[in-house]
Each structure stands twice: as C-alpha cells, then as structure tokens.
C-alpha cells in the first residue's frame, strides 16, 4: 500500500493514469480488469473508500445471467467462481395472496435458456466468490486496488482530470469512472442529476437451509406486499429476496428469530421441509434511480451510480456488467485508434449504447413492481390474464427468457457474447 | 519560375478556417461533425496501413516507425491519433493559427507531432518523403486539385500509400453535405463547402495515376442518423475515401 505513483515512474509518453475507477465492487473491478486485459499498456487504478476485506463480510448471492457469465468467462474468472455457482434450471412464477393455500402457477421456465449451448439461463453466485476472484485477477494484471481511499474531489481540465484522494495524494487521469453505487458522490460532484422513484419498500435479504433439495428451481411469488423470490444456492440452501413495506421490513429484520422464521414459513411454504435461517438478515430500501446523463467530459458513470433499479427481476447487477462490457469496449477501441479516451465524442458511444437498454429495463421493472404490489381486484385479474397469456405464447415467453438471460437489446458489446474486445 | 509560383493555397479558405481555429478541439463546437467522423476514417486508415505494412491493428502502437504526412492538418484531429498509434507524424497546414492551436494541444496531451505551417509544394521541394500521405477533407479546399495531388503523390515512398477523403460533386452531395449540413442540421458553419469546389473521384484518380500510383480501394461513407454514427457504404455519391499505392522499388 505504499507504492504511491510518481509521475516520473510512469513511462514518459503516459505521464498520468489513463483510467481511474472509483469503486471496488464488481462493476469497478470488472471494468478495470476488462480494460487492462485488452489493453495492458493503459494505466488503470481502482480506489474504494471501504476498508480492505469488508467485501468478505458480504453474505449475499446474486443471479448472474448468461450474458454476464460470458463476460466473467472472457475475464478468466468464471472458472474460479463455477464451483460455488448454482445453476438456475427452472423458474416458477406465481401470483397469490399469502393466505392462499395453493398458489396458481402462471409461468414456468424449464431447463436451459434460449441458446443452443445447453447452458442454464442464470447462476446463483455468492458475492464473495465473485469479488474475490475479480480481485485476484486484478492483482495478476498489476492493477493497484487501494482500499480505505476514496475520491474526494476532482477538477476537469482540457487534457486530464485532477483527482484528490482521501489519503492526501492526487492523481491525474484521462478518464474518471464512477462505480460508487446508487448514492454516488462523484455523480453529484460532476453535476449529473438523477430521476428517483421511491417505492417505500425494502428487500429483506437472507439465506435459508431447507430439508429437501431445490432441484435448481428459482421461485418468484408476487405477494401483495411485493415479490418474494427464492433462488437456489449450492447444497440445500436458497437465497431469499423478500419485499415488504419499508417499515414492516425493518420490524421483521429486528424481530427475534422465532417470529422471523414463522413469518418466513408462511411465505416460503413447507414443500422443501423444515427451514432454518443461516447467516444474517438485512433490509435494503428499494427504489429506481436513473442518472440523467451517463457521461461528462473525462467522466463516466457505470453500474448503480448510473441506474439503481428495483431488484425484482434480478437485473441490477447484470445491467452493471453490461455497462462494463460497453464501456470497456468503447475505451479500448478508441485507444486502438489513438483517440482521447476521455473525450465526450468517444464516451458518447457508451452512453448511446447503454441508455436505451437501461431506461427500458428500468421502466419495465418499475411497471412490473407497481402492477404486482397491488391487491386491487381489476389489477389482479389483468396480471393473472397477462401471465397466463405469456405462458401460452412461445414467442413472448422466449422474449422473457432472453430478457432474463440478458441477451436482448441489440448490438451487443463483444464480451457479453463471449468474445474478447 | 512560373512552376514555382504555382500554389495550391486558397487564401479565403485558409482565412475561414483560421477564424474557427480555437474550436478545433471542442467536440460539441463547430467541428463536431469532424469529431464524429474521426473513428470511421481512423479505422479505415489504420486497417489499410496495417494491411500494407504487415502490422496488427489490435497491437499497441501499430504504426510504430512509419513516417506519415497529414496535409491540411487543421487543429490536429487526425495527426494526434496517428502519433498515438505510434507513427512519426508531420502535420502541415497553410494556416499559422491552426498550427499554433495544434501545437498547444499536442503539448498538453503529451503527444509528439511535428507541426509546421508549410505547404505541400514547399515540402516536396525540400525533398521530403513519407510512407503514408493523408489528404483527408482537404482537396475540396485547395485551389489547384491537379497540381496539389501530383505534388502530394510525389512524396509517397515506394511501397507507400496515400489516402484521399472528400465530398463528391453531385446533386445529392449538394443537397446533403452542403444544404442539409449547413442550413438544416447546422452541423457546419454556412459556407464551409462550395459546390463548385467539390471533387469527383475521377478527378482524384487521374492525377494520382499519372504520378505512378495505383488506386486500390474506394469506399463511400454514409451517416446513419438512427445510430448517430458514420458507416462505410458502397454509395460514393456524397462522402467518399480512396487509397492509392506506389509499387515497391
């Protein structure tokens, strides 16, 4: 942690950083690795305000869709993650009141995804495994990752941006990428405004152990308070995302184990036998935050800093990986043409590439959530009929599968289809 | 002396570009169309040069060791990327003001380019020669296309090549590249292009052939407003680029 970069230590034709990534989550790390892997001569550095090893305390798991898996494969980290990844082979979507004895099943997605490669359309991956392997890859590529170091402020000039770091040091960089999450400080400093919708809901996230195997089935029950999703983990374990009104969620998280498990069983049911909560439980407020612009001179937003979406369809992280694939390809291709990678004329390609997809996904997710978090009879009938129709129309259903895989949205960045930049 | 007095400089054109010089590097300013056009022409040049000289276009600094002349370099929008790709670039422009802007910008970016306020004739007379001579968006602004291209061709080394990009003299070009771009879309300041100064492909190929070069590739370039980007196209009626090579010695 003492290797402070001095201008003279860098090769004379690049007396500064090419890319400074603010944020050491998967978006920031995979962006740095993607760029460095395709263009090793670029000077890339990652800073994160969190202390080192804090990521090891993350007990959550994420659904990684096929397109994101392709990217992780190209980056050389998927092999390392694979043993801890549980394929989702079947998705069941139901719509019911909690008290309904039998939940009508409206949609089932069986077996492999839409592709011919026989790959499941998604995997459940522990966050720790993903961050750990990305960090090892960053180290292998010689990318400095500085923990407990955040970008405190920056000033953008014609040729570079000067960034002040919290450890008192400074960097010059041709491009600053903010991957610092949904409440991005850098986004505010860049003067980029957001549009925000607050749902007044929170997602309770926890892991449960059950007696019988889940057979790779993911379930999403649209309950009146919001979606209740179970996602298969390795062994007889499942990850839960349980949506409640923010106040109810807080009460549930703070209640004693007995109450929590009883409330959980009412929703989870008994089909997998007895349940036991393993590990902690936390509630995350849900909302939709969209940045009005994704770029500014020598500045780009990626991941939740650009778009924090409701996790109802598990797309937040996967949208982040799509940002990474598009931004890395934009930067590397511009660099191969000798262009200034921080120029707005270069970054516009990334913004055009990502905004349509993001807004569409955000709006779709928002509409789904509003539709499903409502117990009014006309809306119930409407969505029941809607889901029934989807299940009977192969074209529409395969659209939803591709959506779940992350392979819709035209003009793919190469890494999302498993190619190098 | 009559031949030496012959010039390719159109002073009115030089003055017009000098007046806008400060905006060369503003990607949202008067030269925005050129910034948008840059990736497609750079890709075309890089890939053709890499093909000719056996280089890998995905490598770092693929043009290392090649001497390149960027004639009519303006603020250096082409020269700087070529130099970053490793080439040894001489950027020449008739406008002192352009050269001043280009030099200052290159110094700030830390990219080495040899910028000179000099004409093609003067360089040829001094016996300069290059692996690649770039004539990008220039011939429609010079006063004597034939003489200009002959002069440029004379500086292409054996085994070397030259690129010419310009706008065709067709009714379609008058409608799109001049009327629409300058008056409707306001992409370019009015008066940037005059119809009678536009150049047809055969008017480029004739002097190049006469100078011993062979035209080996021609392509149209077309703006796709939906994708907001330029693409190569078979249609050479508006914007087009061509490549000519000199056989190895």
Image: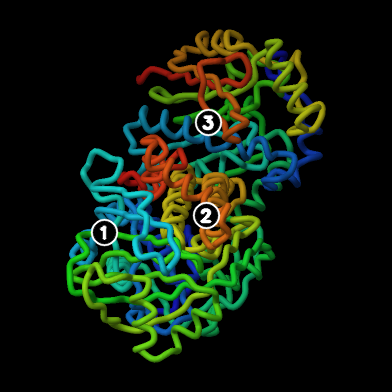
In the image, residue A11 above or below residue B244: below
Q: Position of residue A32 (x, y in %)?
A: 40, 62
Real-space CA distance between mark 1 and mark 2, rounded to the nearest whole angstrom: 25 Å
The chain to which mark 2 is attached is A
Callout 2–callout 3 Cβ contact below 8 Å: no
Q: Which mark is residue A157?
A: none
The residue nearer to you, when weighing B161 against A239, is A239
The chain to which mark 1 is attached is A
* Front: mark 3 or 1: 1
Asked if marks 1 and 2 fall on the same chain, the answer is yes
Q: Secondary structure at mark 1?
A: strand
Q: Quadrant of residue B140?
A: top right
Q: Residue at x 60, y 28 (%)?
A: B223
Q: Which mark is residue B128?
A: 3
Asked if marks 2 and 3 fall on the same chain, the answer is no
Q: Position of residue B30 (x, y in %)?
A: 75, 39
Q: Residue at x 37, y 27 (%)?
A: B52
The residue nearer to you, when weighing A140 against A278, is A278
Q: Secondary structure at mark 3?
A: loop
Q: Residue at x 59, y 51 (%)?
A: A343
Horizontal relation, residue A75 to residue B178: left or right: left
Residue occupied by mark 1: A217
Horizontal relation, residue B203 to residue B94: left or right: left
């Amino acid at each position: 942690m003492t290797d402070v970069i001095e201008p003279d230590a860098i090769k004379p034709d690049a007396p500064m950083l090419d890319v400074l990534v603010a944020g050491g989550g998967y978006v920031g790390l995979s962006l740095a690795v993607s760029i460095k892997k395709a263009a090793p001569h670029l000077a890339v550095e990652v800073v994160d305000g969190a202390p080192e090893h804090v990521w090891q305390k993350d007990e959550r798991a994420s659904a990684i869709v096929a397109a994101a898996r392709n990217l992780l494969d190209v980056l050389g980290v998927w092999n390392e993650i694979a043993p801890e990844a549980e394929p989702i082979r079947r998705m069941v979507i139901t719509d019911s009141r909690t008290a309904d004895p039998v939940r009508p099943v409206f949609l089932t997605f069986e077996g492999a995804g839409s592709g011919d490669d026989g790959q499941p359309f998604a995997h459940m991956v522990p966050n720790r495994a993903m961050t750990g392997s990305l960090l090892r890859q960053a180290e292998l590529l010689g990318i400095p990752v500085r923990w407990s170091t955040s970008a405190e402020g920056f000033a953008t000039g014609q040729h570079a941006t000067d960034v002040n770091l919290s450890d008192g040091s400074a960097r010059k960089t041709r491009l600053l990428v903010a991957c610092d999450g949904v409440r991005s400080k850098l986004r505010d400093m860049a003067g980029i405004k957001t549009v925000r919708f607050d749902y007044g809901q929170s997602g309770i996230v926890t892991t449960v152990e059950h007696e019988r195997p889940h057979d790779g089935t993911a379930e999403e029950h649209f309950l009146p308070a919001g979606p209740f999703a179970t996602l298969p983990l390795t062994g007889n374990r499942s990850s839960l995302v349980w949506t409640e009104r923010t106040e109810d969620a807080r009460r549930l998280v703070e209640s004693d184990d007995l109450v929590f498990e009883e409330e959980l069983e009412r929703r989870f049911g008994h089909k997998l036998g007895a349940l036991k909560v393993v590990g902690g439980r936390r509630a995350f407020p849900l909302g939709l935050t969209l940045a009005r612009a994704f770029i500014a001179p020598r500045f780009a937003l990626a991941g939740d800093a650009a778009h924090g979406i409701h996790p109802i369809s598990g797309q937040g992280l996967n949208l982040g990986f799509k940002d990474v694939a598009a931004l890395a390809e934009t930067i590397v291709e511009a660099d191969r043409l000798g262009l200034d990678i921080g120029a707005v004329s270069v970054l516009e390609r990334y913004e055009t590439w990502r905004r349509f997809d993001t807004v569409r996904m955000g709006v779709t997710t928002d509409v789904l959530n509003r539709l499903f978090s409502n117990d009014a009879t006309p809306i119930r009938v409407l969505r029941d009929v809607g889901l029934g129709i989807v299940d009977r129309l192969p074209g529409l259903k395969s659209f939803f599968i591709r959506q779940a895989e992350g392979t819709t949205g035209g003009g793919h960045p190469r890494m999302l289809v498993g190619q190098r930049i | 002396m009559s031949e030496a007095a012959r010039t390719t400089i159109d002073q009115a054109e030089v003055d017009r570009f000098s007046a806008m010089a400060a905006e060369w590097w503003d990607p949202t300013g008067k030269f925005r169309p050129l910034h948008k056009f840059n990736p497609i022409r750079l890709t075309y040049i890089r890939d053709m040069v890499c093909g000719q000289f056996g280089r890998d276009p995905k490598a770092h600094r693929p043009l290392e060791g090649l001497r390149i002349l960027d004639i009519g370099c303006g603020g250096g929008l082409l020269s700087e990327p070529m130099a970053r790709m490793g080439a040894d670039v001489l950027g020449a422009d008739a406008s002192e003001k352009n050269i001043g802007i280009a030099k200052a910008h290159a110094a700030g970016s830390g990219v080495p380019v040899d910028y000179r306020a000099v004409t093609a004739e003067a360089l040829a007379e001094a016996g300069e020669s290059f692996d690649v001579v770039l004539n990008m968006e220039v011939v429609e602004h010079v006063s004597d296309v034939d003489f200009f291209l002959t002069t440029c061709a004379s500086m292409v080394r054996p085994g070397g090549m030259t690129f010419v990009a310009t706008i065709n003299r067709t009714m379609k070009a008058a409608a799109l590249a001049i009327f629409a771009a300058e008056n409707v879309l306001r992409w370019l300041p009015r008066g940037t292009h005059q119809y009678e100064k536009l150049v047809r492909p055969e008017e480029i190929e004739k002097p190049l052939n006469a100078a011993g070069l062979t035209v080996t590739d021609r392509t149209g370039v077309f703006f796709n407003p939906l994708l907001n980007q330029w693409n190569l196209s078979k249609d050479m009626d508006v914007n087009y680029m061509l490549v000519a090579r000199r056989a190895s010695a």
